[in-house]
Image (spheres, rainbow, N blue to C red):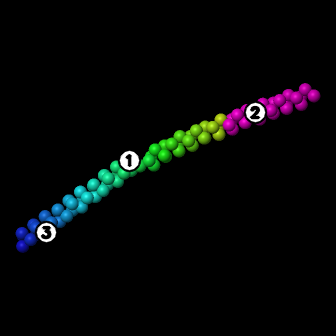
């Protein structure tokens, strides 16, 4: 009876060791696949593009504000001269 339990215990241990090894290999291959993926590179490129676009729009907005302020000042000084 003890021999049967030992055999069953060894069988279970072997089963779970194989299962863990298989899952570990699968996880490792998935990690390698993700590292080879171009998605990370594409995300990085899009972040750079969006940052550049945001900077450009902020600069454009500030330029328009400066022009509007100078136009207001010009109109104010012209109306005061009359």
The image shows a total of numbered marks equal to 3
Left or right of 12 on screen, residue 4: left
Residue 60 falls in image quadrant: top right
**50 versus 20 height, above or below:** above
Residue 55 picture location, percent across and down: 61, 37
- For disc 2, the marked residue is 67
Q: Is residue 67 magenta?
A: yes
Give yes or no for contact between labels 2 and 3 (Cβ–Cβ under 8 Å). Answer: no
Q: Residue at x 90, y 26 (%)?
A: 81
Residue 82 picture location, percent across and down: 93, 28
Cα distance between the residues tagged 2 and 1:
49 Å
**46 versus 78 height, above or below:** below
- For disc 1, the marked residue is 35
Left or right of 54 on screen, residue 63: right
Q: Is residue 77 magenta?
A: yes
Magenta residue span: 60-82
- For disc 3, the marked residue is 8
Residue 16 picture location, percent across and down: 21, 62
Left or right of 30 on screen, residue 18: left
Give yes or no for contact between labels 1 and 3 (Cβ–Cβ under 8 Å). Answer: no
Which one is nearer the viewer's eye here, 72 or 43? 43
Which one is nearer the viewer's eye here, 29 or 64? 29
Q: Residue at x 46, y 44 (%)?
A: 41
**34 versus 65 height, above or below:** below
């Amino acid at each position: 009876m003890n021999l049967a339990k030992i055999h069953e215990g060894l069988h279970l241990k072997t089963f779970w060791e194989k299962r863990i090894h298989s899952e570990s290999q699968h996880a490792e291959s998935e990690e390698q696949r993700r590292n080879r993926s171009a998605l990370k590179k594409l995300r990085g490129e899009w972040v750079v593009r969006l940052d550049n676009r945001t900077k450009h729009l902020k600069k454009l907005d500030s330029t328009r504000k400066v022009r509007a302020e100078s136009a207001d000042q010009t109109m104010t000084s012209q109306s005061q001269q009359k």
